[in-house]
Image (cartoon, rainbow, N blue to C red):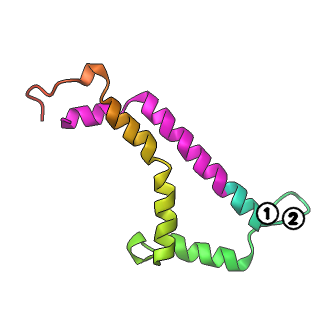
Amino acid sequence: MCRHDAHALLQNPDLVEELASVEHERWSHWQRYLHAQCVPGPDGSLVIPAGLADRWATQMNTPYAQLSEKEKESDREQVQRYLPVIAAALEAGPPAAAAGCGDQP
């Protein structure tokens, strides 16, 4: 696949929408989990327990390469959600207007 074909593929609005849908589902799943861990306040607010807040603060400030293998595996599991959409887009190829490499790099 030519570089401009790959760029066209990644800019395809249909692909962006599919990936946005996957991202929303991933985010929603996390929010359901987060809300279940929190303590509801009388005003409807949610309080993250100190132990979780501390753990998550440590994780979010740790570069991926320095995460534990268990934490890395959790991130890998999240990436797996996107791969079927990307694979389908690659199999379908770029939009017809971008077909053919010609002299473009």
Magenta segment range?
A: 1-30
CA gap between label 2 and label 1 equals 6 Å
In the rendered view, does 37 fall on the left or right side of 20?
Answer: right
Q: If the image is split into quadrants, where does the N terminus sit?
A: top left
Residue 16 part of the magenta segment = yes
Please report contact status of discs 2 and 1: CB closer than 8 Å, yes or no. yes
- Number of numbered discs on residues: 2
Residue bearing the label numbered 2:
41
At x 65%, y 53%, the residue is 29
Residue bearing the label numbered 1:
46
At x 34%, y 29%, the residue is 92
**Which residue is outermost to the top?**
97
Residue 41's x, y, as percent? 87, 64
Name which quarter of the figure residue 48 lies in: bottom right
Q: Earlier in the sequence, mark 2 or mark 1?
A: 2
Residue 30's x, y, as percent? 64, 57
